[in-house]
């Protein structure tokens, strides 16, 4: 019973970590990377579709992305999605493809991006705390129902807290790495 709960905790907390890493990969640094925009939702026939499903994305120059839609009629939708995003990039549409030039990050913009990273880290920590809270509640219910002893419940809660601490350390590590990448000139 406790092992199943801890296994569920590991899975759910790892999913939160993966989500954080995926989320932070979309925050741009000084160089162009397709991962910045691959998952950007583009409204396509009334449905939000990831950009990677609508276009090929390449890096012709170190600070430029080239987006070639599979269907030329989606150019305007892609253009609109880029402008609506929080990337702060202006698309250059030539009728066949869209070019995104990554401007040099100013010191102010770098600090802004670091704040965004910290917010995303905190959101992940909250998710992890909520997972811990739900599973502690489950352990207490198991104990009330007589499925586990009080000692087992306390041991389970202690192990769950240790796991939570480990995952929070990983969140910090991932955030520090991204912060260093952003502040690098």
Image: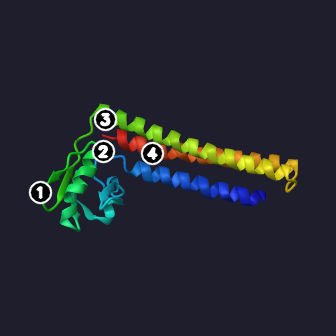
CA gap between label 4 and label 3 equals 18 Å
Q: Indicate which disc, 2 or 4, sits on the residue closer to the N terminus.
A: 2
CA gap between label 3 and label 1 equals 28 Å
Secondary structure at badge 2 equals loop
The local crowd at label 3, few if under 14, some if 14 to 19, many if 20 or more residues have their Cα within 10 Å, is: some
Q: Can residue 182 be seen in this view?
A: yes
Residue that numbered label 4 is attached to? 177
**Foreground residue among 73 and 178:** 73
Q: Indicate which disc, 3 or 1, sits on the residue closer to the N terminus.
A: 1
Labelled disc at residue 94 = 1
The local crowd at label 2, few if under 14, some if 14 to 19, many if 20 or more residues have their Cα within 10 Å, is: some
Residue that numbered label 2 is attached to? 87
Residue that appears at 79% across and 50% down: 141
Q: Is residue 64 visible?
A: no
**Residue found at the very far front of the displayed protein:** 46
**Foreground residue among 47 and 106:** 47
CA gap between label 2 and label 1 equals 20 Å
The image quadrant of residue 9 is bottom right
Provide residue 115's location: percent of width, then percent of height: 41, 35
Q: Indicate which disc, 4 or 1, sits on the residue closer to the N terminus.
A: 1
What quarter of the picture does the N terminus occupy?
bottom right
Secondary structure at badge 3 equals helix
What quarter of the picture does the C terminus occupy?
top left
**Foreground residue among 166 and 155:** 155
**2 vs 4, front mark:** 2
Is 44 above or below relative to 125? below
CA gap between label 4 and label 1 equals 36 Å
**3 vs 2, front mark:** 2
């Amino acid at each position: 019973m406790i092992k199943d709960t801890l296994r569920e905790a590991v899975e759910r907390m790892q999913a939160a970590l993966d989500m954080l890493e995926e989320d932070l990969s979309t925050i741009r640094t000084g160089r162009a990377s397709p991962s910045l925009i691959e998952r950007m939702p583009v409204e396509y026939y009334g449905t939000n579709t990831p950009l990677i499903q609508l276009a090929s994305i390449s890096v012709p120059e170190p600070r430029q992305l080239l987006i070639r839609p599979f269907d030329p009629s989606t150019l305007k939708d892609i253009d609109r999605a880029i402008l609506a995003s929080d990337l702060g990039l202006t698309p250059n549409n030539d009728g066949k493809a869209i070019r995104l030039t990554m401007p040099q990050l100013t010191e102010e913009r770098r600090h802004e991006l670091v704040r965004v990273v910290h917010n995303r880290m905190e959101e992940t920590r909250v998710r992890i705390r909520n997972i811990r809270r739900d599973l502690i509640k489950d352990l207490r219910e198991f104990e009330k129902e007589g499925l586990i002893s009080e000692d087992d419940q306390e041991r389970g809660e202690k192990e769950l807290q240790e796991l939570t601490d480990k995952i929070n350390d990983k969140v910090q590590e991932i955030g520090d790495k991204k912060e260093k990448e952003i502040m690098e000139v």
